Every structure is written in C-alpha cells, then in structure tokens.
Image (cartoon, rainbow, N blue to C red):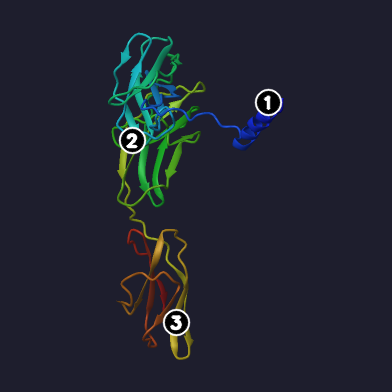
Amino acid sequence: MRKVFSFLIFFISILLGCGVKGGPYPPYTKSPETVKTVLIKQQDQDLIVYWRYIPRYADGRYMKENFRFEVFSFEHRVVKKINKSGNLYWFRYSFSHEREYCFRFRVLTEKNKSRFSRYFCYIPTLGYPKTKPDFEIKIVEKGIKLKWKNNNLKTNLYKGKEKTLYPVPYISLSANQYLDENVSNGKKYCYYITYEDNNGVESPPSDIKCRIFKDIFPPEPPKNPKLIEKDGQFYLVWTESRSKDTVGYIIEINGKALNKIPVKTYIFKIPEYKKGSVIKIYAVDKAGNKSKPAILK
C-alpha cells in the first residue's frame, strides 16, 4: 500500500513540475495560402473582379517564391490577363446575359498549389447607366482641376497610369468637379471617370486624359519689409509669403542679388547700405518661380 501511495505522489509531482504542455506546432507546408476575399462590381458590360493578396504559405509564413493565379468558372478555366498594383489584383470579364457569374481561385507556385477558394458570384444587369461621361482637365495654381456635367448620379474618379483601368476609384463624389492637389511638378497624371447609379452599377468609363503638372504660378510676395539698425549693423526683416510652397527668399539691392540660394528665414543682415538704395525681396517656390518683389526704398 505504501509503495502504491509513494508512486502516486511521485507521479503527481512529475506532472506538477512539468506543467501542462501546449499543443504541437502546425507542420510546415510549401502550399500557398488560397485567395480568401474577392469583390465583384459591374462597369458597363464588364464585370470587374478584384482582390488583395499577400503571398503567404498556408501555415502563415511569408512566401518569397514566384506565384500565379488560376481562375475557374462553373464551366471552365477563365483565361484573362490579371493586372496588378501593389497587392491589388484584378481582371475584367465581359458578360452578355443577366445571370449569375461565379469564379473561384487557386494559387500556384513552381511545385505546389493552394486549395481552391470558395466561389464568388455576381448577377449583373443590362440596366446600367449607358452615357459615357466626359470631363475637362486643366492645370491651375494649386494642382490639376477636373470638371464634368452635372447629373444626379455619383461620380467615381480614377487616377493612375495611362491606358490602365483600375478597379478601385481614387475618390467618389456627388459634386461635378475636383481639384487634385496631390501632384508634383514635372510628373504625369492620368484620370478617367464613371457615373454610378443607386445600385452601385457604373457607366462606361470616360476616355483617359493625362496632364504633366507644371508649376508656372509664382508665389505670393512677402510683405512689410523693414530695415532695422542695431550696433551700427543693418538688418532686413519682412512678413513671410502666404504661399505654402515657398522655400525661401532672394534679396536684391539696386538690382544686385545678395544671395543665390534662397534664405529660409525672414531676417537678413545687409552688408552695405546707403541712403537711396532700393531693396527688393522675392519669394521663391519649389519650382523656382519668383514672386513679385516687396520693395523697400
């Protein structure tokens, strides 16, 4: 009896000392993770099928090897060019009937493949907005301005590369114009628009229009120039330009520039000053445009 009791105490002490072990780690796998979420929308007589995919193996590890997608309908494999922008993928699929269209996906590497995704389905309509929109585009002081006709539909504005139709709009608006201030000097920007009805169905896309943004607009000049004398030295001070893209100021005395590189302050020491001199202060923006001068005589 004592031996049995001692054995039980020994066994319990081992269990308490070791604790409860967790479950085993999942086995590593080279099979890629499948596509989990796919969105489908209608634009004209095209279905736009799009999804985001971060390459991982089925065990959660990031996948660094090359991969590709296979797409299948109920009837057959769908062979379409799959576009890519970052981790966003999409293709366009033309339809002709108001019936349900379904797609499922598989991810393939050189030696492995994922399991099939579930089917993602959509029933299109032939009652979509038929009018192909048009818009005006021009460069203005603060960016690129787009304007189109007033209508009762929402407008989707797409922005990207030339000859590329994207699945996700840059912005959706109820207004009939938009000023894109997110532009940089010398870069090319392309846009197109669609109209969208209350059911989320879009019209044919407009033509893609592109512009190279060129900042030819000078900044606002500085104001209130004053000359201050202290300990025999003269200092020029002024109120800064209100333009946000101002990078500094050029100072001239009698037509001669005192600095080639714009100063980023609003106070400047004048090395020589004579009565009757004319001082001019110019604001300079990122594109190198100079403002009208603030003049101190």
In percent of width and height, residue 72 lies at: 35, 15
- Dividing the picture into quadrants, the one containing residue 45 is top left
- Dividing the picture into quadrants, the one containing residue 59 is top left
Q: CA distance from mark 1 to mark 2?
A: 58 Å
Q: Earlier in the sequence, mark 1 or mark 3?
A: 1
**Contact flag, marks 1 and 2 (Cβ < 8 Å):** no
Query: Residue 231, relative to residue 142: is it above or below?
Result: below
Residue at image x 45%, y 24%?
Answer: 36
Residue indicated by mark 1: 4
- Tag on residue 235? 3
Residue at image x 35%, y 44%?
Answer: 138
Question: What is the residue that sits farthest to the front in this orientation?
Answer: 2
The kind of residue on which mark 3 rests is Tyr
Foreground disc of the pair 3, 2: 2
The kind of residue on which mark 1 rests is Val
Q: Earlier in the sequence, mark 3 or mark 2?
A: 2
**Near-viewer residue (252 or 101):** 101
Residue indicated by mark 2: 64
Query: Residue 17, relative to residue 123: is it above or below?
Result: below
In this rendering, would 32 be left or right of 5?
left
> Please, what secondary structure does the residue beneath circle 3 have?
strand
**Near-viewer residue (196 or 50):** 50
> Please, what secondary structure does the residue beneath circle 2 have?
loop
> Please, what secondary structure does the residue beneath circle 1 have?
helix
Query: Residue 236, relative to residue 98: is it above or below?
Result: below
